[in-house]
Amino acid sequence: MANVATRFVAGSGEGLVAAETVGMTAAKYGFPRLAAAAFAGARAPGPALVGGFVGAPLGLLAEGAASNAGLGETASVAAGVSAATIAGAIAGGAAAIALGAVASPVILGAAIVGGLAAGFGYLVSRALR
């Protein structure tokens, strides 16, 4: 059911794919703990959904605030992506903890996938407006 829900939260499906890519890259270059965390995140659609749902709107708010403060378009988009990714990572990690995760690779993986989903969700929603 959760994999079906990734079709409706912008960026969550992309976040799962990107987390798996991070895991493969980390394994290739000899970072087994990062690979384990990223693979754990790639298997958990819940944190991706929460991260995308929470982070993407906050990215849009941060972009608007940066634009109103007088920053240019590139800097405003950078502020939006940063805010979305950070908020999504926090939300994804919090979702994993709320669901009972106690192992640090699982929590870190949830934060990775939540942040990636939020960043992608922000960029997708920005492109669609």
Image: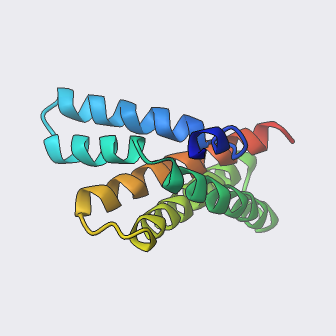
Position above or below: 45 against 47 = above
The N terminus is located in which quarter? top right
Q: Residue at x 24, y 63 (%)?
A: 104
Residue 8 shown left or right of residue 104 in the figure:
right
Identity of the residue furthest to the front in this view: 1
In terms of image quadrants, where is residue 128?
Answer: top right
Towards the viewer: 76 or 98: 98
Q: Where is residue 57 in the image (x, y as percent from the top left)?
A: 72, 60
Identity of the residue furthest to the right in this view: 129
Q: Which residue is drawn at 25% across and 56% down?
A: 105
Towards the viewer: 5 or 25: 5
Position above or below: 12 against 63 = above
Position above or below: 63 against 12 = below
Towards the viewer: 123 or 89: 89
Q: Residue at x 69, y 43 (%)?
A: 10
The C terminus is located in which quarter? top right
Q: Position of residue 113 (x, y in %)?
A: 45, 48
Residue 50 shown left or right of residue 18 in the figure:
right
Residue 93 shown left or right of residue 14 in the figure:
left
Q: Where is residue 97 in the image (x, y as percent from the top left)?
A: 39, 71
